[in-house]
Amino acid sequence: MATTTTLAKADEGTEAASHAARIEHVSKSFGGPAGQQLVLDDISLDVAPGEFVTLLGASGCGKSTLLNLVAGLDKPSAGAITTDGRPALMFQEHALFPWLTAGKNIELALKLRGVPKAERRDKAEELLELVRLKGAYGKRVHELSGGMRQRVAMARALAQESKLLLMDEPFAALDAITRDVLHDELTRIWRETRLSVLFVTHNVREAVRLAERVVLLSSRPGRIARQWTVGIPHPRRIEDTAVAELSVEITEELRGEIRRHGQH
Amino acid sequence: MASTETTPPGKDAGDLAGLEAGLDALETQHRGRTPFRQTLTQKILPPVAAVLLVLAAWQALVSFKIVDDPTKLPAPSDVWAVVHQAWLQGELLGYIWTSVSRGLSGFLLALVIGTPLGLLVARVRFVRAAIGPILSGLQSLPSVAWVPPAVIWLGLNNSMMYAVILLGAVPSIANGLVSGVDQVSPLYLRAGRTLGATGLKGTWHIVLPAALPGYVAGLKQGWAFSWRSLMAAEIIASFPDLGVGLGQLLENGRNASDMAMVFEAILLILIVGIAIDLLIFSPLERWVLRSRGLLVRS
């Protein structure tokens, strides 16, 4: 029961942190019956305050593993991770608690952060308004559509007031139109709040549409293969030619990485 | 790239809000209440018809002298007369209340003991290894087996009745909670941990509410076991000083070879058991499942 996660915390409060997350020479291997399997190999990556970084890779590149390490849900086998406070985490599944209403889900996050009872309700309504779900306070999770659930989940993550938001393929299960709308929402909220975001995806277009920086991971073991800085100004659209051009380039690189696994 | 910059940001934001409102409206299902007429024809009429059919068949067996022995099979009207008389003499509610008050207080006691026990078994590995299998094994032991030892240990009194109820109901309640906790999705635990719900906070805010459906199923079964155990105890350990409950009524009927009284007691035991389930446990279960979207309104 005593599985408290120990978070490697940066020097909070003493000075403005120069990074939202710093990943230094991190490796992770999982023990199995066939011996140790190296999943992440010597990853070093900094996320600057206010920066939007996407981690891109094929299956088995360990991108979700890396995110779990940054979230403090697991420990690296080697190397160190420091974050500026406890990061918030959003999953592919909305992970909202079905026994609570949308509003109470957000209030639970506030409560666990130590926000006094009197302020919680107003704060939760405010956050729902931020994700444009005014009036959804009393709705049960099952009464909301997939897109609305992910927006409530986003509001709950924002309630943590973390400086870093980790997102593990949060829109992968949504239909294309809803996903596109949520891309716009996330960009708007990111620009309004100046959060740092570390966003994991296997969708190249999504990575390019959202990020300031795209980090491509190779698979088995996961290593940083290449990085791109995305200079396309906002608002971006998924159909933009600039998005398409960079996506083509990154996809070629990703395909090359995947092809390597077929040749022995 | 150039084309995107020509869109004024304000207009874009307005479009997005409108688009989002449209999507939300399209994807949200509106469900109204089931009309009363539909509830009547689909939920209430079928069981009523079934009961009436059984009563008609029973009356026919007696009326057409297919079973012509009132000491074996009394007519429904004879049983009704006995119930009616007990009601007129003011004894009927007394029988019911004696048993129901015993049953419910025994159940509440089982709840108070079974809940922390279940939580311990679910969350502490050593406790689970030590008593988990015994607890599930106890569930398959008919609680009537506890009546003789309980009488020897505690004598013919109310404590004996409560002991038998506890031995029947505590394992059900504890096991219900254990399986509820076991079925908590790891996703909720991970989500809880990222929100800062660890240790006792995690148990209180995440594990217990997430385990509620399994726990309520355990409570429902726990009540059924309480009621059965109590009836076994009342029939076997019938003693005038204990007051006449439904079990004693059944035993009294047998001693007096009064088959109408025996039937009266059996029917009352059945009706009370069903009524408590319908009034307390089924609504509780439906409410828990429905509020989580786990029950489709039919």
Image (cartoon, coloured by chain):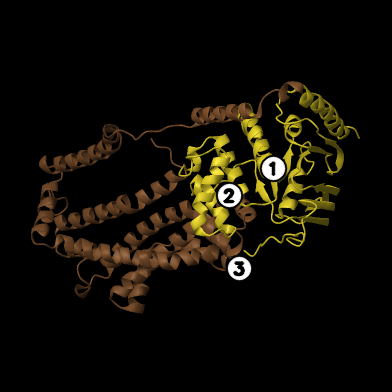
- Which chain hosts label 3? B
- Per the model, the C-alpha gap separating discs 1 and 3 is 35 Å
Give me the disc on residue B126.
3
| Foreground label between 2 and 1 | 1
Residue sitting nearer the eye, B173 or A129: A129
**Residue that numbered label 1 is attached to:** A168
Q: Is residue A91 above or below residue B172?
A: above
- Rendered image quadrant of residue B223: bottom left
- Image mark for residue B92: none
A155 w.r.t. A178: above or below: below
Q: Quadrant of the N terminus of chain A?
A: bottom right
Which chain appears yellow? A
Colour brown, chain: B
Tell me, for residue B185, which label it has, or none.
2
SS under mark 1? strand
Taking the image as shown, residue A197 lies to the left or right of residue A113, namely right
